[in-house]
Amino acid sequence: MWGFFSIIGLIVVLYYIIYLILWIVLDSDVELAFKERFGKPISVLEGKICWITGASSGIGKSLALELAKNNVKLVISARRIEELNKVKEECLKIAPNLKEENVLVLPMDLLNFDSHESKFKTVLDTFGCLDILVNNAGRSQRVKSWDSIDINVDRELFELDVFSVVNLSRVVVRYFKAQKNGRGHIAITSSGSGLVPVPFSPSYCGAKFAVNGYFSALKVDEPTIDVTCFCPGPIATPFLEECFTGSPDAKHGIPVSPNERRMASERCGKLFAVAIANKTMLSWVGLFPISALLYIVQYFPNLRKIVMVILGRKGMQAIREGEKKED
Ligand SMILES: NC(=O)c1ccc[n+]([C@@H]2O[C@H](COP(=O)([O-])OP(=O)(O)OC[C@H]3O[C@@H](n4cnc5c(N)ncnc54)[C@H](OP(=O)(O)O)[C@@H]3O)[C@@H](O)[C@H]2O)c1
């Protein structure tokens, strides 16, 4: 009898040891790493129509290039048309099978909510249908302290990172539901900060927790709609320059340093494409120890307290901003 219980105990211990090793070596959650190796290839998306917001730089641009390589037809949106045109050029260069008319540059300011319906109409007029909407546009935040934030910053940040995402998605979900099979796919670039609160970004954490909540609720209310909440840790993109601060109209304005330890935007774009191809509901990516921390804080509340005390505010921020390498 004791032998039987010992074997069960050993299996449980081995299971946790294997998981612990995976958390250390992988740059994503275990499900996404498994899907990358053994799941559906990104090429299952070939021929689909995908609309990416915030495609003029960073993660959105990298995702657009990854999907273009796999012959996905693209709608790329953001405010800067010159940057979008450059992204389109790059897409056509790396994807010889994509034609000029397969990539639509659709400039828009997402804060102009009244334009969402008409922009979507342009997508339908161009391609006849839409399969996937990727809500990627957004701005982060760096502040001195929680109590130093002007409430108008909270409002502005939520307008872009939450309400514009929800409004555009509602326009598209109504269309998906009106289709014969009622199916469609909504993906959101959330953040690790939407799973674990990080220091110096209270409004941003609130916004990313909110989008995770909104879109988990979408999946519950509309089971035929696929929803992917994609949560990156620190990624090397120009996002810091445009970051909100605590004061309205003041931007952080400091570029990401190449010495910071951040996942390359291209790798993030590839993992995002894997998550979309495999319709994962929640995925996260980041260099060690991001994934391990996200597991511990979400699934081991007692350990979470200890980890947060040991790291403290400064330690968490150092991990989040990417420890500096020795020059
Ligand atoms: N980089 C990271 O470490 C990290 C980590 C976790 C999550 N994220 C999330 O990833 C997403 C993309 O960020 P990123 O890091 O790739 O930064 P980024 O390079 O600054 O990209 C932000 C994108 O959003 C667009 N955008 C901003 N305001 C807009 C508006 N009002 N209307 C339309 N488009 C707008 C920008 O284009 P225009 O300026 O041309 O409009 C740009 O294409 C964001 O949602 C961010 O919160 C980033």
Image: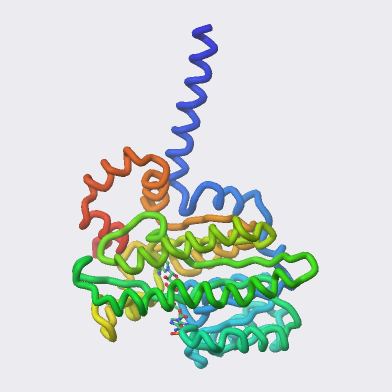
User: In which quadrant of this rendering is ligand 1 seen?
Assistant: bottom left
Quarter of the picture holding the C terminus: bottom left
Q: Quadrant of residue 63?
A: bottom right
* Residue depicted at 61% across the width and 80% down the height: 91
Instruction: Report the front residue among 253 and 214.
Output: 214
Query: Residue sitting at 32 percent across and 39 percent down?
Result: 303
Q: What residue is at 60 percent from the left and 54 percent from the top?
A: 36
Between 271 and 226, the one lying in front of the other is 226
Q: Is residue 266 left or right of residue 176?
A: left
Q: Nearer the viewer, residue 37 or 54?
A: 54
Quadrant of the image occupied by residue 254? bottom left
The quadrant holding residue 74 is bottom right
User: Where is residue 207 shown, x and y percent of the image?
Assistant: 40, 67
Residue 281 vertical placement versus 73 (above, below): above
Percent x, y of residue 79: 48, 88
Above/below status of 223 relative to 19: below
Q: Residue furthest right?
A: 180
Position in image of residue 58 (x %, y %): 46, 75
Q: Measured from the top left, where is residue 109 in percent x and y?
A: 49, 87
Image label count:
0
Q: Residue furthest bottom?
A: 82
How is the rendered protein coloured? rainbow
* Nearer to me, 97 or 250: 250
Farthest-out residue, front: 221
Q: In the image as oriented, which residue stretches furthest toward the top?
A: 1
Q: Is residue 220 left or right of residue 238?
A: right
Q: Is residue 131 above or below residue 191?
A: below
